[in-house]
Amino acid sequence: MTPLLTIVGLLACTVVPILLLSLLLHQDVIAVALGDLSVRLRAWLRRRFRGEEPAPLGRPIEQIATDLRRLSTRIDRAAPGMSFAKYDSTRRAYDDALVEGCRAMDVPERLSWLPPGVQRDQERRNLEFRLEQCGLRVHDAA
């Protein structure tokens, strides 16, 4: 075997496991960067190495989707006389349902720890889009 092939083989044997370990350790960062591809990769890795899908920990996704559509309609079509307290509690319930939907669909989220403000509003819209991309209809078709 030539020295060049030996060096290339050694590099491949050391670099590939390090890259795979980095992928596994930093999968949340990768999930944000790669979005749906990373979610599918993690699901495949889970099936491949555990041999089975994890048991659902929360409510059925159908119930979560129903709550999301119901609450989004209440927020989008808020009555002119609705008190701020009622609007805010509805929005918080909607955020909780979004977080629950993200956990059920294995979509990384930051909404649960962001303070109220512009960043939280942007994250809410981002999660709505990402859940729609995963097939979870968040808004009623009007």
Image (cartoon, grey):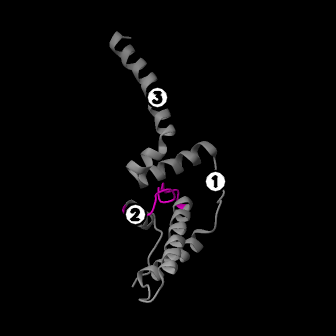
Q: Residues within 10 Å of mark 3 (few under 14, many from 20)?
A: few
- Residue under label 2, please give it: 117
Between the C-alphas of marks 1 and 3, the distance is: 27 Å
Q: What kind of residue is marked 3? A: Ile
Q: Residue at x 41, y 81 (%)?
A: 76
- Residue under label 1, please give it: 54
For the magenta stretch, what is the residue range?
105-118
**Principal SS element in the magenta part?**
loop
- Residue under label 3, please give it: 18
Between the C-alphas of marks 2 and 1, the distance is: 35 Å
Q: Residue at x 62, y 69 (%)?
A: 60
Q: Residue at x 48, y 46 (%)?
A: 28
Residue 19 shown in magenta: no
Q: What element does badge 1 sit on?
A: loop
Q: What element does badge 2 sit on?
A: loop
Q: What kind of residue is marked 1? A: Pro
Res 131 → quadrant? bottom left
Q: Residues within 10 Å of mark 1 (few under 14, many from 20)?
A: few
**x and y, in percent, of residue 55 in the image:** 66, 57
Q: Nearer the viewer, mark 2 or mark 1?
A: 2
Q: Mark 1 or mark 3: which comes first in sequence?
A: 3
Residue lying furthest left = 4
Res 132 → quadrant? bottom left
Q: Nearer the viewer, mark 2 or mark 3?
A: 2
Q: Mark 2 or mark 3: which comes first in sequence?
A: 3
Q: What kind of residue is marked 2? A: Gly
Q: Residue at x 39, y 62 (%)?
A: 126
> Can you say which quadrant of the picture contains the C terminus?
bottom left
